[in-house]
Image (cartoon, rainbow, N blue to C red):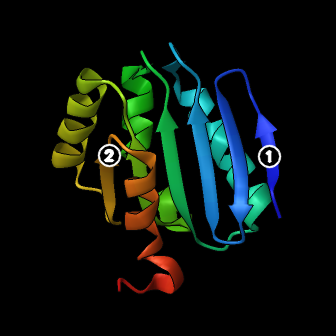
Amino acid sequence: MNQSKETDKFIIALIEDDLVRIDVKPNTVVEKKDIEENYIIYNEFLNGRPALFLVVFGEGVTASDEARLELANFKRDKIKIAEAGVVPSLVTRIMAQFFMAFFKPPRPIKMFTDEEAALKWLLQYRDGNKK
């Protein structure tokens, strides 16, 4: 099942039918065009069906103002059942938590420092059911 595609800033992989992993490369500045490109890749992998998303951030990842506004456009996020982020940097984690508090995503989303804990939390939303 493992399909993957690499861009200059991301490695996106369909790990299982309902699980997408996104690795954000270190020292990346995410732009609006990157988010739009990723969305096309998600749809190629998922064919419009919803999935769980695990996002693993490298050190030094930031996003432009335009990218943050695009991330707040939740209409395009109907394919996301739940999302877990693994954030190694305290600064990035604080920025992500501020963003989530301000924009209030319509799906379950949580930040972690540990990938195993993130995946465990995320998988409880499999099949649309929180266990």
13 or 66: nearer the eye? 13
Q: Left or right: 110 with respect to 27?
A: left
Q: Residue at x 35, y 83 (%)?
A: 130
Coordinates of residue 58 in the picture (x, y in percent): 49, 25
Q: Is residue 23 left or right of residue 120?
A: right
Q: Residue at 62%, 39% (x, y): give it.
A: 36
Question: x, y (%) of residue 93?
Answer: 27, 33
Mark with earlier residue (2, 1)? 1
Q: Residue at x 16, y 47 (%)?
A: 101
Which residue is nearer to you in this view: 65 or 98? 98
Q: Identify the residue under disc 1.
A: 4
Say which residue label 2 marks. 112
What type is the residue that disc 2 sits on? Phe
Is residue 7 in view from this perspective?
Answer: yes
The image quadrant of residue 71 is: top left
The answer, for residue 74, to whether it is visible in the render is no
Q: Is residue 28 above or below residue 128?
A: above
Q: Is residue 75 left or right of residue 50?
A: left
Task: Give coordinates of residue 57: x percent, y percent.
Answer: 47, 32
Q: Nearer the viewer, residue 43 or 114?
A: 114
Q: Secondary structure at mark 1?
A: strand
Depth check: give the residue in front, 6 or 107. Answer: 6
- Which label sits in the foreground, 2 or 1? 2
Residue 96 quadrant:
top left
Give the SS element for disc 2: strand
Q: How far across and how far down the image is residue 43, in percent? A: 72, 58
Quarter of the image with the N terminus is bottom right
Task: Give the CA separation, mark 2 to mark 1.
Answer: 23 Å
